[in-house]
Image (cartoon, rainbow, N blue to C red):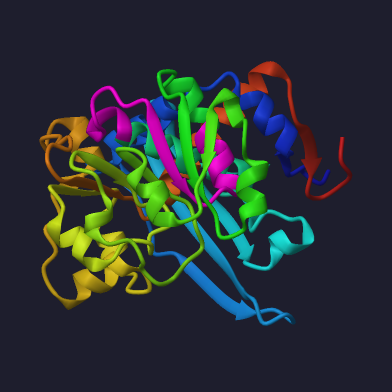
Amino acid sequence: MTPSEELLFLDRETVRACVAGVDPVEVVESVLRSHAAGRTTLPAEGYLPWENDQGAYCRSIAMLGAVDGERGPTYGIKLINAAVSNPSIGLDRAGGCGFLFDPRTARPVVLAEAAYLSGLRTAAYTMASLRHLGPVGFDAVSFIGTGAQARVHAALLARYFPAVRDLHVFDTERSRAEAFTGASGHTVHVHDTAEAAVRASHVLVTLTTVDDGYIPHDWFRPGSFVAHVSLDDLLPEVFFKSEALFVDDLELIRENPRRVLGALLADGDVPVTGSLGGVLTGAVAPVRPRDGVVVSNPFGMAVLDVGLLAEVAAHARSAGLGTTLDLLGAAR
């Protein structure tokens, strides 16, 4: 008798249904603590770039990771692809899938739509950084970029920081920024320039696709926090003049000179204060902004995706959600 090779398939709607039963910020913080304690494995990314027939930048990133957490060892991969021309045809810029592997047989046992989870992981990391490093008592946030990542960030801000009432946004496509108005119950203010949006609050989240820095240090109010999510928006002077600079994994950033902080680390010393995981374990003292700027620069770790997918899959199994596929036979 031929053995089955079953895996649980979770489409986006099922993933979203499962997320309602998961606290993504708590999951991200738990994995960060495991990472800081050396209980994760984070191999180098696989990276494949190309140009499509419109001359637009495309890329595929394969991100493997393992976490030894409360559920035991978890192994998996996120494959996330993007084309910057996708929004012009009505698609989100990025999309992909995630897998979990059986620890004993190494076979894939879970397959899930990954773009939403990837955005959720990223936004959950921002919320965790704000929780531990952000200004005290802020009630407004600025977004540069109003695409899919901004929508997930707005949803989590409403969940974890209900005192935030106002979102100040800028997008190079003004129509996209205007369509963002009213998201998650916030009052959204659309600005004509990136500088105006940055100056409008003490918290900035960059959510763009740029590969050239444009934000100088003097755009920030004293006592500001920036979540440098899209990784290339800040000019080098912001890192050097920051009150504190926190990362997710220093070596991961150092190994990628395509990004501004990676390039700066390759060229010499940058005053990195420590990791958010170090803050969570007590190894690094947290720093909140006082008279200057505190920068959070997460590169994006596969172990966070793997840990979050493991929680979502556990919820799906307990709730009887998802579709069982047999790789050697038909869907059931």
Residue depicted at 53% across the width and 22% down the height: 22
Residue depicted at 35% across the width and 52% down the height: 228
Residue 89, position in %: x, y? Answer: 78, 62
Residue depicted at 31% across the width and 33% down the height: 130
Report the front residue among 313 and 256: 256
Residue 68, position in %: x, y? Answer: 36, 37
Q: Quadrant of the N terminus?
A: top right
- Asked if residue 157 lies left or right of residue 130, the reply is right
Residue depicted at 56% across the width and 76% down the height: 49
* Quarter-of-image position of residue 27: top left
Report the front residue among 135 and 171: 171
Number of callouts: 0
* Chain part drawn in magenta: 130-154
Residue 248, position in %: x, y? Answer: 29, 48
Q: Quadrant of the C terminus?
A: top right
151 magenta-colored: yes
Report the front residue among 46 and 268: 268
Residue 146, position in %: x, y? Answer: 57, 48
- Asked if residue 25 lies left or right of residue 190, the reply is left
313 magenta-colored: no
